[in-house]
Image (cartoon, rainbow, N blue to C red):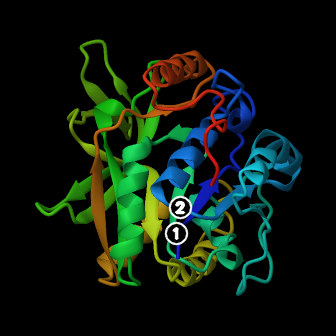
Amino acid sequence: MKPSLLILAAGMGSRYGGLKQIDGVGPQGEILLEYSIYDALQAGFGKIVFVIRPDLEAAFMEKIGQKLQAQNVPFEFVYQEIDSPIPGIAAFPKREKPWGTGHAILVAKDAIKEPFAVINADDYYGADGFRSLAKFLQTECSPEHYAMVGYVLANTLSENGFVSRGVCETDADYRLLSVTERTKIQRNEQGVIEYESEAEKLVLPDATYVSMNFWGFHPNIFDALQSDFINFVKNNWDHHKAEFYIPTAVNDLMQAGKVKVSLLPSQELWYGVTYKEDRETVAQAFQAFIAKGKYPAPLWSASKA
């Protein structure tokens, strides 16, 4: 059975200043996640599942759904809302934003029954990561063994502002030991990568592996997330900005000895549209990819799934 690809696309895009998930960056108006989908299909993934807000469905259908239909690629929309029904939770507190990436995965529980990958809609991961993760999901994934594609920190920065990354600790065999969320990461005037912690700036080496939310899971992750999320809601009833993050949930499973997670190293350059100013850099990168023959233009002109 082919693994599925779960795309997290319900974010507001607040720093970007608009609906960045469907802003075209390719020469024919292709959006960033189309290139991820293309790479995933080439690597052997099957069904595509989008986590979106209900008000985005028409725009996503117009931008990408119709193209996937033409390619005979199975896909499905699931919806992340503040009060998306979760068994075990009778009611939710009032809040203004969704519950985070862990909750976004959880709303796809009924749509995915096979090993699957998770990506962000507004990040470009590169074909190499999809190939290595597809191989893992088809040959090594189990209820006790997950994976994460790790990227070199220096390859994942934005020239237009700070970013947040999950900083990884591994052993000599690339077994993931921990993922720690670090915020306000950027190069300083001396060219050193720093992050902010309690108003103090600390250094991170360029070669540090970081998480870009590119995970490979067995479907048993849904049961673990559901149990943790029920407790999270209870414990954060009055914390209206608290978010249930994927790395935190996976860390809990690792520390409890319930799963091991392999880090699959990638040397690919990351491209993303965290800020509106990033769009031109990304568009130029894809023009170069196309000139080198990495992608056809139009993207779907030469590929049938």
Which circle marks residue 45 in the picture? Answer: 2
The amino acid at mark 1 is: Pro
* Farthest-out residue, left: 172
Which circle marks residue 79 in the picture? Answer: none
Q: Is residue 35 above or below residue 225?
A: above
Q: Is residue 111 above or below residue 199?
A: below
| Residue beneath the point at 64% across and 50% down | 304
| Residue beneath the point at 81% across and 47% down | 66
The answer to whether any part of residue 252 appears in the image is: no
Few, some or many C-alpha atoms within 10 Å of disc 1 (few <14, some 14-19, many ≥20)? many
| Residue beneath the point at 73% across and 79% down | 86
Viewer-nearest residue: 264 or 209: 264
Q: Quadrant of the C terminus?
A: bottom right
User: Where's residue 72, x and y in %?
Assistant: 73, 57
Secondary structure at numbered mark 1: loop
User: Where's residue 38, x and y in %?
Assistant: 57, 45
Q: Is residue 245 left or right of residue 237?
A: left
User: Where's residue 223, x and y in %?
Assistant: 56, 84
The answer to whether any part of residue 46 appears in the image is: yes
Q: Which residue does the numbered mark 1 point to in the structure image?
A: 3
